Image: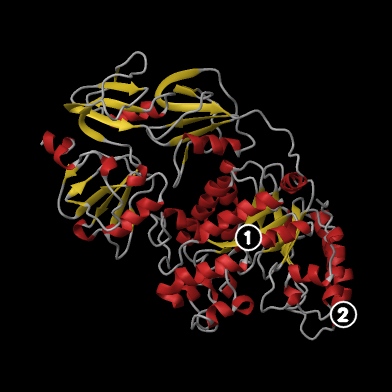
Amino acid sequence: MKSTTLLLGCLLLAVQVFADHANGPWMVGINMPQNDLPNMPLVIINGTAAMCHQRCDAEPMCAAWTWETCLGKQFCWLKHFTSPYVQAEACFTSDVNPKYSYGLEYKVDRPGDDLPNMPLMLDGNSSTPLDCMAICASTPNCVGIVANSCGRECWLKAKLSDGDSNANDCRTVMRNKLSVKPSWIVGKSRVGADMLGMPLRFTPYQGAPDCEKACAGNEQCAAWDYDTCNFLCWLKSSAPSDTVDARCNVGGTKDKPQPPPESCLGRRLEDVKAGRVPVRGGNLGSWFILEGWMVGWVWNDNGCSTNNSPGTTMLEQCLGGRANDAMRKHWSNFITEDDFKIMSDNNLNAVRLPVGWWHIYDVQGGVANAPLKQHVEPTKGYAFGAVEFIDKAFDWGEKWGIGIILDIHGAPGSQNGDDHSAPPDNSHQHYWDRYGENQAQTLDSVEMYLQRYAGRKAYTGICLMNEPKVDTGLLKNYYINAYNIIRRYSRDSIIIINPLITNQNTDQPEWTDFMNPPQYTNVWMSMHWYHIWGFEGKSDDWKLNYIRNDRKRQVDNYMNKNPKKGIIDEWSNGGINDGRAAMQAQIAEFNRLDGGWTFWAWSKTWGGDNWSLRAAFEKGWISRDQTGVSSC
């Protein structure tokens, strides 16, 4: 039995000789039962081994994979290391990822070129070459290892010569594809000073450089430790001098604080993140959460109906197998880097970015394949690939001095039944507060977004739910739970809470007494102040007078009664024919609110120029000097 489970040498010859073989041949009847990446397995409905191979090929840290169909399973297991091969039933298929090969060689020895004081003696009788490799991964100048599979010896190598090898039934050679910096400490772990919520598990990226990067992106982090055996990252609020031996650990301290950004755009971004300058920006509406009245051409061009399939979820279900291509075309063209440059040139400093709860699960192969902790519906039919463009938004924001405020615009089950919440059906019903799983899944999605983006320079904050019509008690519980999750990853970024869209009285005790400082830090209150719904039949002059008088009083009341900063994160010139007069009247009052504003929306769409901040600048309805943001 040992000979079959140990490494099956006749099947294993040198991983590095495998060519690109996207359609096989693969190793049928072989299982690799160890070294899974976090959150495995991926479930791929109607999947194939080829799909599992593709997932591995797309995952930067995937060294190998196993596809399992036993007893009706459709499981794809991605591996951090190439595991020992085990003979199994035909329902298992495995292979390595040639792009991420560790250069495995079985029954081979490469003598010489050892690092000092070799061999090391591994702990326990069940040690494997992977334990030896974990030590190499955290040791400077280690390019590979030779491990004794029949004993416990581990040789770390300063060099692995391709031409110098001997046959040896007990030896395994692995090449180190990782590296450490000279400033890191290896083989030791700092004691204490762990920040709240530690350790972090990286999904999908794991590695000491990612742990270092997470520390660099957290203002309160002074040092970090990474466990190369278990893929765990600890961020620390200080750099304790006390250490303990830990053969799998590598760690470092944050680089010395850099001086304030020298570029004007860098200072602009830091100013809005720190609250020194109010938010001035637009909503990237209908980029990821589509609305038919704005971008109805996406429906029309693909044979779908905005009446029968309102909102993103039903649109993508209507698209079926065309969804990925159709949505990618939209994502690629609707917002580009040029938009961010134009915003920056017009002295804007932020965008509000509406997203759905499901988009972030692209990092796990798409929401239909992700190992969700909650049972929510639907999960099938969603297009794949949005995260690539959300990443671009952060890239462009960092380049052009634009802060990114994520906005949970589409919650599981829909929080309001309207098309802009991507409802699951056409009933105009909302289901978010009917099922606890929907509320729990929203928290899971928020955490996934924070895991990916909290460390990004452009990350400015998150709006926890757009325009809810749900039970207020459940909504408040969600806000508090989300706050506690977010503060594990970002100590002082902006957290925006929305009242019910049906009751915007944010100067009343229901909201003035909720989530206030000092217990809650940097929590802001959202208002959506439009002058179209509820204003039917009113003349332009009447509406403009309402803005100059009633809106002025509402801003004053909020500032006097609500301890939280306020932000009008949706407003427009809609409903008033004179777009310039509407814009000038509103910014005269809205510029006084301490949190700031984001106009709905940025882009020019079927909604017309009154619904586009870009059009407002182009038409001269607002000038760059009126934003209050310094020019660069």
Q: Is residue 556 visible?
A: no
In the image, taking residue 498 as reference, residue 31 lies left or right, namely left
Identified by mark 2, the residue type is: Trp
Farthest-out residue, left:
1
Of tags 2 and 1, the one toward the viewer is 1
Toward the viewer: 576 or 417? 576
Indicate whether 369 appears above or below 64: below
Farthest-out residue, top:
117
Residue 432's x, y, as percent? Answer: 52, 65
Q: Secondary structure at mark 1?
A: strand
User: Real-space Cα distance between discs 2 and 1?
Assistant: 32 Å
Indicate whether 614 appears above or below 307: above
Residue 618's x, y, as percent? Answer: 79, 70
Q: Write the residue at 54% across / 74% down.
A: 311
Q: Write the residue at 83% across / 58% down.
A: 627
Farthest-out residue, front:
163
Which label belongs to residue 353? Answer: 1
Where, by quadrant of the figure, is residue 153 drawn? top left
Q: Write the residue at 57% across / 51% down.
A: 482
| Cβ atoms at labels 2 and 1 below 8 Å apart | no
Identified by mark 1, the residue type is: Leu
Q: Residues within 10 Å of mark 1 (few under 14, many from 20)?
A: many
Which mark sits nearer the N-terminus, 2 or 1?
A: 1
Q: Is residue 183 visible?
A: yes
Where, by quadrant of the figure, is residue 558 drawn? bottom right
Q: How many marks?
A: 2
Q: Residues within 10 Å of mark 2 (few under 14, many from 20)?
A: few
In the image, taking residue 551 as reference, residue 131 lies left or right, namely left
In the image, taking residue 350 as reference, residue 364 lies left or right, namely left
Residue 530's x, y, as percent? Answer: 75, 72
Residue where numbered disc 2 is placed: 542
Residue 423's x, y, as percent? Answer: 52, 72
